[in-house]
């Protein structure tokens, strides 16, 4: 029984994947060679410069490298948090809770002579103007 007359049923053709072309194999090898060459050049340059630098300069470079390395995980965390899918529920999403303002009870008015007959009236002598209050600002030049 041959398989030619049978429908494929959506499984596609069985068999090995096609072999990569000659150009793609050459491009991969060229990429690997360039990567090795670049790494060797960078390592040689780092050794040559490192031999000529002072101890203080090497400490500064080491601190900068460690600082950049320490900043990578928080940066990745920030990127991960900010690139969440829009369907992901967030803790702060939703309506705001109602705002309730509680005021203390009103204090009874302090009785004065003008409003309460139990107290004698406070009189200002005639011709005396009320005193002007003085305020001193700390730190102001006299």
Image: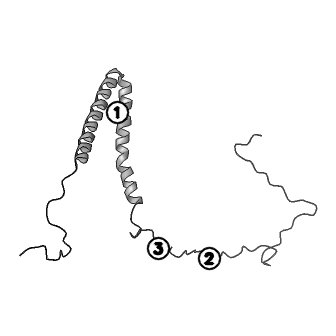
From the viewer's side, name the closer residue of 108 and 136. Answer: 136
| 10 Å crowding of disc 1: few (<14), some (14-19), many (20+) | few
Q: Are marks 2 and 1 in contact (CB under 8 Å)?
A: no
Left or right for 5, reference 95: left
What is the spatial separation of the Cα atoms under label 3 and label 1, in whole angstroms? 47 Å
Whichever of callouts 3 and 2 sits on the residue coming sooner in the sequence is 3
Left or right for 39, reference 101: left
Total count of labels: 3
Q: Is residue 114 above or below residue 128?
A: below
Whichever of callouts 2 and 1 sits on the residue coming sooner in the sequence is 1
Disc 2 designates what residue?
Answer: 105
Question: Residue reaching furthest right?
Answer: 127
**Label 1 residue SS:** helix
Q: Are marks 3 and 1 in contact (CB under 8 Å)?
A: no
Residue at 18% over, 71% down: 11
x%, y% of residue 55? 35, 24
Disc 1 designates what residue?
Answer: 62
């Amino acid at each position: 029984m041959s398989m030619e007359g049978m429908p494929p049923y959506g499984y596609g053709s069985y068999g090995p994947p096609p072999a990569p072309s000659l150009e793609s194999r050459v491009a991969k090898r060229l990429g690997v060679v360039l990567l090795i060459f670049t790494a060797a050049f960078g390592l040689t340059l780092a050794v040559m410069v490192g031999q000529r630098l002072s101890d203080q300069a090497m400490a500064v470079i080491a601190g900068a490298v460690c600082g950049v390395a320490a900043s990578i995980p928080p940066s990745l965390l920030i990127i991960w948090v900010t690139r969440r899918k829009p369907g992901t529920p967030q803790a702060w999403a939703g309506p705001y809770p109602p705002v309730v303002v509680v005021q203390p009870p009103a204090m009874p008015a302090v009785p004065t002579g003008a409003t309460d007959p139990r107290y004698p009236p406070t009189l200002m002598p005639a011709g005396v103007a009320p005193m002007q209050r003085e305020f001193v600002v700390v730190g102001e030049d006299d």
